[in-house]
Image (cartoon, helix red, strand yellow):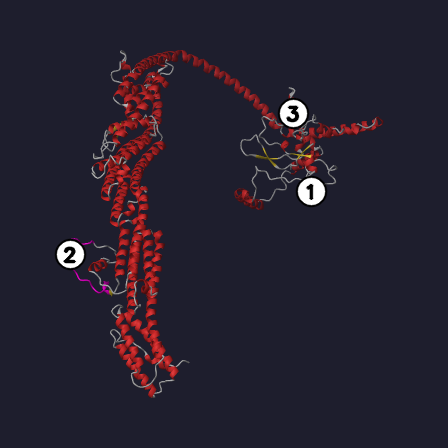
Amino acid sequence: MYAMASSHSSSIVPHPNSSKALYRKGLDPAQQLGLVRSLPDVCPKEPTGDSNNLCDEPSVVADQHKWTIYHSKVNLPAALNDPRLAKRESDFFTKTWGQDFVETDVLPSPYLQPINKDHFSSYIQQTSLREKNHERWKSICPPKDDYNRTAFSHVNKSRADLDQVPKIFMKPDFALDDSLTFNAVLPWSHFSSASGKGSRDAASAKLLQEKLSHYLDIVEVNIAHQISLRSEAFFHAMTSQHELQDYLRKTSQAVKMLRDKISQIDRVMCEGSLRILRQALTRNNCIKVYNKLKLMATVHQTQPTVQLLLSTSEYVGALDLIATTQEVLQQELQGIHSFRHLGSQLCELEKLIDKMIIAEFTSYAQNDLNRPLEEDCQVVEEERLVSLVFGLLKQRKLDFFEIYGDEMMAAARNIIKQCVVSTVSQIDEIDSDLVTKLADQMRMMNFSQWFNLLQNIFAKFTIFLQRVKATLNVIRSVVLMVLDKNQRIREMEVTAAQRGLARDSNVDNDLAYLTHEGLFISDAFSEGEHPHPATNTNLQRNASPSSSEPSGSESVSDPECTTDSSSSKDHTLPSVTPGGVEIIMTEDIKLTDLELGKIANNIQELLYNASDICHDRCVKFLLARAKDGFLEKLNSSEFVSLSRSVEVFVQDTEKICGRRSMSLRGALQSQANKFVNRFHDERKTKLSLLLDNERWKQADVPAEFQDLVDSITDGKIILPERKSGCVEERKPSDFLTVDGQKYAVVGTVLILIRIILEYCSCVDDIPSITTDMLTRLSELLKYFNSRSCQLVLGAGALQVVGLKTITTKNLALSSRCLQLIVHYIPIIRAHFEARMQPKQYSMLRQFDHITKDYNDHIAEISAKLVSIMDSLFEKLLSKYEVKAPVPSMCFRNICKQMAKMHEAIYDLLPEEQTQNLFLRINTSCRRHLKNQLCLLNVINDGGPQHGMVAADIAFYTGNVQALKGLKDLDLNMGEIWEQKR
């Protein structure tokens, strides 16, 4: 059992017959009475041929994709076994069948969008002004109550009478053949009772008849009233009908008279003129036949002419002649039986020409790329290249650059092979009989031989790329010429179309003038027909001049030939290639601007590929030599030379091709990373050995190290060139002078400064390793700081070197060496910063951490010096007693130790640092003395003990201030008498 799902009668339903998404409001319930259909059977009836008996269901074939109400069904078991109901409905079998039989949620229609207030905003804006005007006018002009009251009363009366008639009679679809309508009008149910009520049925029938008669009278009265209201218009229409018939009769008579006059004019004036026009048309037809025969004779000479052009490698001319002949065969000579096989023969000939052009272009590319590289970079046989490119473009062989790319790759491979063979043959140490492979022979070269070979390869590839660029520039210029020609032709066509419109208007005026003057109109028509056979002249121009011409009546077509030749010259555009070759392009190359632009881009990309190919071949050559670790074993100068040579080659190729290739730089970067690791390991090992053997004594500074430091001017790090030959001997100095300051250093620091400058110089020579060098240099500086701390502050030198003790002089010397490195860290940082990208500046923070570590180390050394004296003060002053003699032995020992400390550090540290250090030492001494006086209960009361302490203090102050550089030192010894509160 099937039941239809519920739907709303007022819903908006889609109409599938409409091509657009139009919607129409549903019918009212009263209007749907006539549209009621019975539910379809499970098995619809088969059509019987009677159109009235056909099933009104949707067609499976025609309406299989159209949604109808028959798709909305639900079966009885599904309704009874609904799992969403808590319990089964008790009134299921007693409910009225209809749309509310099953509780279903009506889903929103997917064809309707939700309607909100914004959809009516435009309508409200349009009608708001009208509404305001309406309200204003309604207040200004009150309604007229006395306007035609009788008319209104009569209308109200007739409307009241019509209201008595049931509405069913007023429906537009009223039909008694409908059973529902018939039963509503004639309720036969009242007459279908028992036979004993015959008299009652007769009364009911009579009453029904009177009621219908009453309705009929009301309708007739209203119809008569409407006719009376429109009687004047009716009689006016009848009168107008009579007048119209009179007009038609007069018009028929006038037309008859006009036809008689026209027939007379035709006999007198037109028959002779038409006879002349026929003769002119016959003459023109004869001219066309002659020209057609002449054209056929020219076409007949096509194949011999094509063979002649191919023998001289004129591929473009041959293709133009074939294309023109094909066009003539398809247009003007279509259907000529004698030429039925010529089209296919020309197609085969065109395919043969395609193969010949490709083979010729391949041969040209091979000869051009493989010619000796010692020659200049000019394009050879430029005319031949231009002709080949035009032929390839005309035949739409747009992938010819791929052929050139393959030949270019093979030529690059041969260049390296020839260079290696040539170099190996000149080296006597290499026996080619024992070592057969070129790669093995190349690995037997030393660095200078291999480096010269690499520079030779770079030079060859530079010339090779210049030659490729010149050739590709010629090809690209041809493509751009065709592109420019297409644009100019379009402009010319637009201009010609505008002139044609102006010429048509002038021809109309000329025809009117000729007719008025009595001249022959056929002359004007024959003059207008001259420019038609343009193709004929194009074909004759492409054909051989020795072609046979038919004799007789040649003067007839001379004006046509003159016109065609002049028009064809308008579309022939001369151009000049970069090499100075002048070419004349016709409008036969049918390529779009998009295709031509794509070809030009591909040619430019081919130049980039040429650079990439050269770089890739150089990478393979480089890796083949680096296979046995040869490049990793190079010293700094050799690797710098290699890096500079590669960088020059990369810059040269970038200038030639306009794009930087990264493969060779990447390979060099990989080797540079290995070089950096070895470079760093060597110097770190060297520094470690120097530190392990350092005895931390002041070293003499050779003159070359002073020159090395002096070369760092204005924050610029430049290694001085080593002087060769006889050099004047200069004595070493005791101190290293940097920016006017003297630094007492150990030998290890001098070597470290040279190592640091080598790192910076290496960054200048190989910019690609800047970040790696920065990391390695930071590691080296950190290692020096930590290792020197272990050896001096940590007393590691006692076991490593065998020192007996770490003296104050060792500590001061270590501090001064660290200060020298801290002085150069900002200069090193600026040097690296100038060679790094902005996004890499974060790596410079490593120098800040290093500076902090060094300063902390220096502070620890100063604290260590103070702590040495502090422990001495504590030991001596703890035994201090206030008694004679004065000065006491305790203060004599203190002054003696202070003098030793000053003697140890004064020549090593600057005067300012010495003063600061002694201020801290004096503070320590003052603190211990104050504590001892508190224990001895000695106060500044002017007594004998106070006097002896004052004498000791005066002795101490005099001795300290007598030391060099400490004369003005404020010791502030009065603080020892201040009591703690």
Does residue 87 lie above or below 291 as drawn?
A: below
Residue 573 shows in this picture: no
Q: Secondary structure at mark 3?
A: loop
Q: Which is closer to the viewer, label 3 or label 1?
A: 1
How far across and down, in percent of the image, does residue 851 sit?
Answer: 33, 61
How far across and down, in percent of the image, does residue 835 sit?
Answer: 30, 52
Residue designated by label 3: 55
Magenta stretch secondary structure, dominant: loop
Who comes first in sequence, dot 3 or dot 1? Answer: 3
Does residue 394 lie above or below 715 as drawn?
A: above
Q: Secondary structure at mark 1?
A: loop
Which segment is the magenta one?
A: 721-741
Who comes first in sequence, dot 1 or dot 2? Answer: 1
Q: What's the distance in space between the residues labelled 3 and 1, CA to CA?
A: 38 Å
Does residue 816 lie above or below 6 as drawn?
A: below
Residue type at the position of mark 3: Cys
Residue designated by label 1: 85
Crowd class of label 3 (few under 14; some 14 to 19; many from 20; radius 10 Å): some
Observer-nearest of 730 and 353: 730
For the C terminus, the quadrant is bottom left
Q: What's the distance in space between the residues labelled 1 and 2, CA to CA?
A: 113 Å
Observer-nearest of 834 and 312: 834
Residue type at the position of mark 1: Leu
